[in-house]
């Protein structure tokens, strides 16, 4: 997916803004994400909260990003980083959210797959299937997972 801001780079950062019942998902490249107040603020918060803590010697097997790199940038290198760093994130989430266990609001690739399937169903005039896909997307946004 292409960055929704610059349309020039691959989007690897997903920002979900939740206001009441509304969810707005934005896909950005790391460069654009770092310039946004919100994303930059997250990076600064992560860097501040982990300052002085020794970074565990763990790296993502998919992209090679180290936990120390994550602490410095506040950004994952790929979707698998969340799994690779998961055991080390609980303390950070507890400090940020007041809870140790964290589930992402929405699995972006699942929503992207549902959106593609919905678009294809509408093109083929399979409106019942399209309605089901639309409902699955709504449930996913509401429940926090696209596998419902």
Image: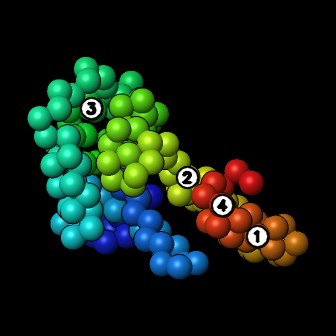
Residue 10 is at least partly visible in this image:
no
Q: Secondary structure at mark 4?
A: helix
Between disc 4 and disc 3, whose residue precedes? 3
Foreground label between 1 and 3: 3
Residue under label 2 = 107
Q: Quadrant of residue 30?
A: bottom left
> Residue pushed farthest front?
98
Task: Measure the alpha-carbon separation of dots 3 and 2.
Answer: 21 Å
Query: Where residue 46 sits: x, y (%)?
Result: 23, 49
Residue under label 3 = 67
Residue at x 31% of width, y 25% of height = 59
Choose between 75 and 111: the one closer to the eye. Answer: 75
Q: Does 117 appear above or below 90? A: below
Task: Measure the alpha-carbon separation of dots 4 and 1.
Answer: 12 Å
**Is 52 situated left or right of 126 in this image?**
left
Query: Where residue 47 sits: x, y (%)?
Result: 17, 47
Between disc 1 and disc 2, whose residue precedes? 2
Foreground label between 4 and 1: 4
Q: Quadrant of residue 11?
A: bottom left
Point out the image quarter for the C terminus. Answer: bottom right
Q: Does 6 appear above or below 111? A: below
Q: Which mark is residue 143?
A: 4
Query: Where residue 141 sits: x, y (%)?
Result: 61, 65
> Residue pushed farthest top?
57
Foreground label between 2 and 4: 4
């Amino acid at each position: 997916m292409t960055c929704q801001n610059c349309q020039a780079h691959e989007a690897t950062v997903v920002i979900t803004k939740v206001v009441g019942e509304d969810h707005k998902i934005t896909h950005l490249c790391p460069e654009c994400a770092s310039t946004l107040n919100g994303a930059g603020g997250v990076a600064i918060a992560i860097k501040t909260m982990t300052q002085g803590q020794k970074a565990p010697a763990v790296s993502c097997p998919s992209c090679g990003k180290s936990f120390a790199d994550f602490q410095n940038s506040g950004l994952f290198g790929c979707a698998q980083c969340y799994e690779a760093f998961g055991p080390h994130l609980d303390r950070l989430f507890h400090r940020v959210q007041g809870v140790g266990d964290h589930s992402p609001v929405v699995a972006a690739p699942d929503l992207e797959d549902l959106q593609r399937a919905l678009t294809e169903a509408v093109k083929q005039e399979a409106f019942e299937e399209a309605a089901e896909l639309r409902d699955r997307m709504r449930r996913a946004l509401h429940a926090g997972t696209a596998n419902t």
